[in-house]
Image (cartoon, rainbow, N blue to C red):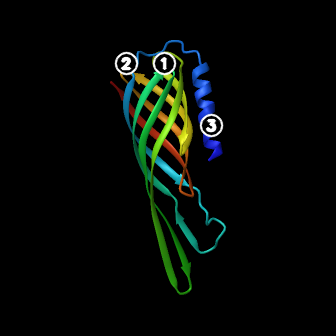
Amino acid sequence: MKKSYLLCSLAVLCGIGMVHAGTPNQPNIYLGFGLSEALADNPYEDQPGVEVDNQAAAYRGIIGYSLLPNLAIEAGYISFGEFSATMKTPFGSATESVSLSSPLVGVKAYAYKNREWGVFGKAGLPYYGGGVSWYYGGRGSLNMSFERYQVNEAAINSVSLELLAAF
């Protein structure tokens, strides 16, 4: 948990200190939808007879507000789908499944290479990550990112494709 606060603070400081050359003309409010491939850490990897399905498709929705040309706050929701574990014994098997989801609140700091490409980092509760953006039409972007989430007691890695539209 302290790691999340440290990364969140670092993202804010980096975002405030960035020089933004060639900033696209972005309005302040944006909405986004993303699809991800989520991979949860396997707590049973050393236990024989336990099969884990720790991969799932995830989706999320976000709303963001640009405070500065290179710093935004975001809020949203992510659903990771269902993960399961099956224990096999000589007497049969038992399966346990869990569906994970979480609200998201964080900051996003970004820098632009030119009017079409940029990089970003983001951190918040319960996640941190970064990626690249391709800007189109002055009002939207397509983002590809990697994020690490801590939901309940599960650590989840996610590779995402996200579409943002600014208003």
The residue positioned 40% from the left and 44% from the top of the image is 60
Dot 2 falls on a residue whose secondary structure is loop
Q: Which mark is residue 69?
A: 1
Which of marks 2 and 1 precedes in the sequence? 1
Q: Position of residue 148 (x, y in %)?
A: 56, 45
Dot 1 falls on a residue whose secondary structure is loop
Which of marks 1 and 3 precedes in the sequence? 3
Residue that protrudes farthest toward the right in the picture: 46
Which of the pair 43/69 is nearer the observer? 69
Question: Would you place residue 61 above or below residue 133 in this image?
Answer: below
Label 1, residues with CA under 10 Å away: few <14, some 14-19, many ≥20: many
| Foreground label between 3 and 2 | 3
Find disc 2 in the rendering and name its residue: 138
Residue that protrudes farthest toward the top in the picture: 22
Find disc 3 in the rendering and name its residue: 7
Q: Which mark is residue 24?
A: none
The residue positioned 54% from the left and 75% from the top of the image is 87
Left or right of 33 in this view: 4:
right
| Foreground label between 1 and 2 | 1
- Res 43 quadrant in image: bottom right
